[in-house]
Amino acid sequence: MGTILIVLFLVILAVVAASQALGRATYEVDSARDTEFIELDGAWVRYNVIGGGPPVVLVHGWLSSSRIWEQLATRLAQRFTVYSLDLVGFGESDKPSSGYGVRNGSRLLYAFCAHFGLNRASVIGHDLGGNMVVKLAADHPDLIGRVVLVSVPADDDQIDLPTPLWLATLPVVGPLFYALGRAARPVRRMWMRPFVADANDLTDEIVDDAVKSTPAAAAGTLSISRREISRGRLVRQAAIIKIPMLVVSGEEDQIVDPHSVGVWAGSVQRAEICLINECGHAPMVERPAEFNAQVLAFLTGDARYLDQAESPRPTVAEEEEELEPAEGPETDLPPRNRTTTDPPNGAPATDDTADLTREYPVSDAAPADDAPPKVHRKRGGGYRADGREEPRADPQAPPEAGPRDRFENRRRRSTSADGPIPELPADLFDWPEPRRGPRPNRREDDDPPHSPNGPSHS
């Protein structure tokens, strides 16, 4: 019996020692090329710059990298100069043993913008990267022009990890679970499955980026960030932000509570909300066309980009039509200039990306301080550029159903510049129509739940 206890003690000691060694592992860039890496605050950071025009900075989230922005970056590059980076501890950047969290991430972003001389840049942040963006905008209001928050928690209790991934963030034993995910691809795929609503949208990049970090970077970023945003600390600081903000969330997000959009919109003065149905934690990957259109409409100030969100490809006759310019001096835009090619066999082909860059120039006019907060919702499979519902010939007839007819466009006005938005509904997910089917462990008349994949660990 004594021998068994000694062996068991030695095994436990070996496990703890191995876990401690893995938890202290670091990573440094071996050969940093000037075209891909810059040194910021003593760490080598991988970055990329494409396009031309006003600056836009893309900030990824936890267990991710700049690769998650590839589709959006390509789209924005036709109107903007797009800067993306791998945060310290993730992607191809250095991974020291400490120096993580919202505050340190904000300092890194400030150093990044200062390095390139960026001023009044639009910044888009996802997940915990969005918290760093909020901190940056609050600390340096003259540096940021517009902010887009994508699936960003407003408090630590709004973060809900699947249990297998939560185990990898625990002290002592967490590094062993993280090493298991690094060694076995099915394990890390199981980690990241709840990040998307549809398993088909789970890309190899999302799965592989989850283990490009280190146990210290992954666990440290999460634990420190949760403490920094707990009890509404960052939300209260965001109240001083006066620049326009777009808050985006997927209705089916199982990682960050989608109701966080209402908290952010109620804390800032000039906010818009975009809710994407049948979408999880990564709308830039799950719904790229719709998400890109929302971002472009917000950054350029021209809502007609929303017409292109998931719209059918135009026919030859439609391509010959000219876009009638909207009335009023602020929307006096040039006529539509479509780009077409002559494909083989006479089949029509369009470039639905290039044409928009010419017809929708970037607007320099910022909305007024008392501009109405807007909730963008779908109706009839698309969005109205003017924010109104499509007129119906018979007002008594029910609205026509589209492929995802669960959204309606609304504008919400705030009666106070610095107070909450009183006309926003208490439950932003009180849809006019029920869901297509119940999700696991919930009834259709329940409020949208937290992730069913694991308990919330505050």
Image (cartoon, rainbow, N blue to C red):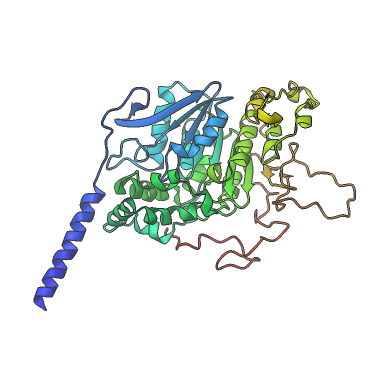
Task: Return the residue nearer the eye: 342 or 169.
Answer: 342
Measuring from the top left, give residue 409's x and y in whole percent: 73, 45
Q: Residue at x 52, y 56 (%)?
A: 254
Q: Is residue 110 visible?
A: yes
Task: Return the residue nearer the eye: 160 or 406.
Answer: 406
Task: Return the residue nearer the eye: 182 or 372.
Answer: 182
The image shows a total of numbered marks equal to 0
Q: Residue at x 62, y 32 (%)?
A: 296
Quadrant showing the N terminus: bottom left
Q: Quadrant of residue 396?
A: bottom right
Q: Residue furthest front?
A: 345
Q: Is residue 294 left or right of residue 280?
A: right
Measuring from the top left, give residue 43's x and y in whole percent: 30, 32
Measuring from the top left, give residue 429's x and y in whole percent: 65, 55
Q: Is residue 348 visible?
A: no
Picture layout, residue 144 above or below residue 276 = above
Q: Residue at x 20, y 50 (%)?
A: 21
Measuring from the top left, give residue 48's x and y in whole percent: 43, 28
Q: Residue at x 74, y 40 (%)?
A: 384
Q: Is residue 325 left or right of residue 456?
A: right
Quadrant showing the C terminus: bottom left
Q: Residue furthest left?
A: 3
Q: Is residue 21 left or right of residue 237?
A: left
Q: Quadrant of residue 173?
A: bottom left
